[in-house]
């Protein structure tokens, strides 16, 4: 039995819960104040923290997913075709590191969202104790989160790009889900769970939820399906099946925004600078450097370099057409 120590307001917690549900791996969902003991057991005290059956504690959702793949063979979320497995990983990484900015922006830029979400998150964490205590905790949490916005690049100046990118992603998803729920066949991959995780919060937070219900109603409903796919069997696409149009649409976002974002961050760190700037979709974006995303870029390049000739022959035209290939080929 695994224990997921997480929170309803944490996209990465929701990702791990959805993965374990789909894979039918026995687990307990632990959230709120009950997670404090687990947080003390890991180097970086951030949720979700997974307690393994052997009593060890681990976090960071993507490594957790791959470790579970090594431990449990059934109902894998990695496509068996190496080329498609790489594309799925690339989309999941994009969701983790860029699409998460939509969640931060919609949740903490406007006062109406700040107040409602901080109170809901306090309610989740405390599970009682009275309204005065709950709202006092909410105000402290709100102040802390709003103060972190510039660190993660979610400023008012940057939000036009974040919002334009999010709408482009949702436009593609809305067109896709009325035909099929999954990206690489009739069963979900790591890519669906990565994107679901971030969008799950847009389906709850006040302003973002209103946007989704009005403009992306089927994507909004899709979130509820991905949350628990334990009853889905499904199959992977047959070899040679053309990629769904959504894959190209999402990879164009990766090529236009995420690849330049990763390169600029890496170049700024190498030069000893504290901030970097890009322009994408006609919008400026400025952020402080972030060392974790150096690891993301190195990992993507290593995964691409490990592809064999057949896999590269399949993915290179797609990566080239969407503006991703040059960055992945650099060392």
Image (cartoon, rainbow, N blue to C red):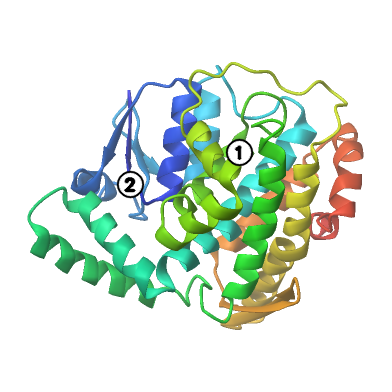
Give the answer, above or below, for where 58 lies relative to 135: above
Q: Secondary structure at mark 2?
A: loop
Which of the pair 268/119 is nearer the observer? 119
Give the spatial CA distance, label 1 vs label 2: 20 Å
Crowding at label 2, few (<14), some or many (≥20) Cα neighbours within 10 Å? many
Quarter assignment of residue 173: top right
Q: Residue at x 70, y 74 (%)?
A: 267
Residue 268 x %, y %: 65, 78
Picture disc at residue 116: none
Residue 289 x %, y %: 57, 74
Crowding at label 1, few (<14), some or many (≥20) Cα neighbours within 10 Å? many
Q: Residue at x 62, y 74 (%)?
A: 160
Cβ atoms under marks 1 and 2 closer than 8 Å: no
Residue for badge 2: 7
Residue for badge 1: 192
Quarter assignment of residue 145: bottom left
Quarter assignment of residue 281: bottom right
Q: Secondary structure at mark 1?
A: helix
> Which numbered disc, 1 or 2, marks the residue that appears first in the sequence?
2
Give the answer, above or below, for where 131 lies relative to 27: below
């Amino acid at each position: 039995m695994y224990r997921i120590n997480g929170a309803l307001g944490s996209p990465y917690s929701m990702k791990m819960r959805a993965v374990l549900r789909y894979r039918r791996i026995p687990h307990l969902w632990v959230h709120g104040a009950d997670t404090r003991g687990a947080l003390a057991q890991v180097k970086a005290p951030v949720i979700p923290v997974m307690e393994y059956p052997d009593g060890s504690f681990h976090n960071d959702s993507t490594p957790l997913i791959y470790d579970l793949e090594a431990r449990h063979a059934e109902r894998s979320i990695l496509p068996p075709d190496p080329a498609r497995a790489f594309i799925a990983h690339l989309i999941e990484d994009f969701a983790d590191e860029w699409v998460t900015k939509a969640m931060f922006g919609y949740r903490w830029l406007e006062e109406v969202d700040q107040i409602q979400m901080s109170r809901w998150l306090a309610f989740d964490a405390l599970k009682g104790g009275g309204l005065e205590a709950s709202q006092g905790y909410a105000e402290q949490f709100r102040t802390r989160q709003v103060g972190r916005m510039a660190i993660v690049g979610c400023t008012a100046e940057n939000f036009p790009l974040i919002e334009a990118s999010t709408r482009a992603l949702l436009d593609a998803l809305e067109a896709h889900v009325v035909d099929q729920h999954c990206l690489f066949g009739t069963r979900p991959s790591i890519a669906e769970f990565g994107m679901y995780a971030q969008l799950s919060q847009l389906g709850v937070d006040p302003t973002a939820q209103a946007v989704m219900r009005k403009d992306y109603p089927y994507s909004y409903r899709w979130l509820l399906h991905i949350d628990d796919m334990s009853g889905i069997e499904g199959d992977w696409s047959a070899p040679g099946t053309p990629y769904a149009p959504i894959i190209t649409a999402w990879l164009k976002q990766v090529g236009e925004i995420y690849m330049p974002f990763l390169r600029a961050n890496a170049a700024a760190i190498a030069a000893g600078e504290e901030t970097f700037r890009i322009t994408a979709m006609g919008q400026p974006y400025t952020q402080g450097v972030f060392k974790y995303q150096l690891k993301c870029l190195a990992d993507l390049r290593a995964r691409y370099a490990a592809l064999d000739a057949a896999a590269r022959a399949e993915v290179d035209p797609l990566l080239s057409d969407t503006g991703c290939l040059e960055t992945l080929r650099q060392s």
